[in-house]
Amino acid sequence: MVLNPVISKLSGKLVVLASSSPRRLEILTNVKHLKTPDIVIGADTIVTIDGLILEKPRDKQDAYRMLSRLSGKEHSVCTGVAIVLYEETEYQTIDFYEETRVKFADLSETMLWDYIDSGEPMDKAGGYGIQALGGMLVEYIHGDFLNVVGFPLNRFCKQLDLLFNPELASNEVVHTDVRSGSAVPPVTSRGPMNLVIEKVHTDDLKRIIELMDGFKASKALFTASKMRVFDLLQKRPGLEGAEVARGLQASLKGTLCLLEACVSLGLLERKQGGVYENSRLSQRFLVSDSPSSLLGYMAHSDETVWKLFSHLETSVREGTNLQAKVSAQTTNDLFQVMYSDDERKLRFMKAMHGIAEVAGPAVITAFDLSRFKTACDLGGCTGSMAHGLAKAYPRMSVTVYDLPSVVELSGTFCPPGLDNRVSFVAGDFFKDRLPKADLYILARILHDWTDDKVHALLSKISDACTPGCGLLVSEIFLDRDRTGPSQGLLQALGLGPGKQRSAGEYGALLESHGFTVSHIAHTDSLLDALLCIKD
Ligand SMILES: C[S@@+](CC[C@H](N)C(=O)[O-])C[C@H]1O[C@@H](n2cnc3c(N)ncnc32)[C@H](O)[C@@H]1O
């Protein structure tokens, strides 16, 4: 096909590219000169692999997750394009998508991080740009190269050809939607230019509103969880709104609003006949008897964290920690504050248990720990991680070490059958002698403490270790430049005296106590992990 005659159909017309992508703008402006307003072209590109859609990475960690998922595999790049053509009082829409298969080479950690640190992945679907540095990640492609860059020019021209030369239309399937101005009067009365909402603006607007409304979504989730909406619908799927209201002993109007909000958030589904069912998400995380239930974490977030965050401004202004703000206690030990109330303590333990059950398996299996025969999980709380370790490593015995008031309640969380290899020891890891072990674990411990306290604890662990002993640290690792992940940076806002750190910062602390970092794993789960060995 000779492209130029087709594309020249656009000259003399003002074409609005409804996309913020500079790459699409470049592809289109290279082939035509834009003048009068008649056509809007919208396009968006996604990358898909193993049934997952990868859009633009939120932050470096997200880019890392995407690129390591793509490493060594073939994936699809799909660009959807919509062309809206205005002619007098009518407009016509054509939409299509183009798919290109791309195979990535096996990427080393260094290559991945060098590429992420170049900053290139951040505004690109799938986290790479094939036209620039990202080209070095690619082994081969099948299909249109420009489609991977962001705009399938060849297919676009074919569609224009069909549009301007309909007599040449082949059997190709084109979705065309012609509407008359009289059918949609408000549209035509405003004129075509008013219809052009730049995608960049709508995306930005959506993002900012989403952030502003974040608290409403959280509170709707907390409330539905607290009122056991998901448990009710798990037991009795397919209830109507009025039946749910009766089951919850709540008002019909309020219940319907809550159910509809939950549908919009993907927590519930409304089926034919207007009945409600749990979505996959709520079946997995919001039902009490699910093994991955996060209801405990939800209650802690609602009852404790939510209240703390209502003091955020004061804490930022005064530099005080949020815990101290609400409790009026002078101690810097947030656990003394947290555990001063039994109900709050149990809620906290349930929260820790829920997260450990969900995120623990990725940490436990991030490295081969089979050479360690005894482990001690310092601050191991309910023993969730310890039971996971004992299950994953059948020759390992694990001691859970935590404060006496925690150990006295941890029995209620124990799964049956494994108790002989998991034991609990009560003590204070800053003051008391640590149990002997080949492997020590600090899961979500160090972020709660200042550097001084971290040094004190690491020094005790180092003294308890013989050469070859391991220490596994699991935390949310911040990116090297502290620009993400936001989950870690938001957690830092609610911390007491503690601090979020990068893997490099943890490594430096550990090395100052005679440990050598052996492996770092950025898991796809909530927590990352670092394994180091005593010199
Ligand atoms: C944030 S939680 C993490 C729990 C668990 N490691 C996990 O990942 O689910 C911190 C734990 O450290 C324990 N802890 C705090 N101070 C302690 C101390 N001085 N000695 C022993 N354990 C302590 C707390 O009781 C709590 O269980």
Image (cartoon, rainbow, N blue to C red):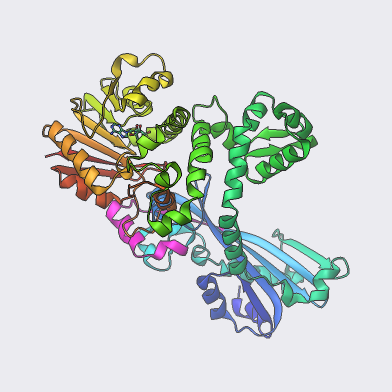
| Quadrant hosting ligand 1 | top left
Residue 249, placed above or below residue 122: above
Residue 117 forms part of the magenta stretch: yes
Q: In the image, 5: left or right of 186? A: left
> Toward the viewer: 480 or 488?
488
In the image, is 460 to the left or to the right of 289? Answer: left
Direction from residue 50 to residue 392 in the image, left or right? left
Q: Position of residue 155 (x, y in %)?
A: 60, 66
Q: Position of residue 422 (x, y in %)?
A: 31, 19
Q: Residue at x 63, y 67 (%)?
A: 42
Query: Over which residues does the magenta segment extend?
Result: 99-123
Residue 147 percent across, percent down from the top left: 53, 64
For residue 102, which quarter of the picture? bottom left
Q: Is residue 310 magenta?
A: no
**Residue at 53 percent of width and 44 percent of height:** 51
Instruction: Identify the residue at horizontal 20%, vertical 28% (top origin).
Output: 432
Image location of residue 24, percent across then percent down: 54, 71
Left or right of residue 133, residue 157 in this image: right
The part of the image, by quadrant, that contains residue 273 is top right
Question: What residue appears at the point 29 percent right and 42 percent down from the top-left corner?
Answer: 446
Q: Quadrant of the C terminus?
A: top left
Q: Is residue 156 visible?
A: yes
Q: Is residue 465 visible?
A: no
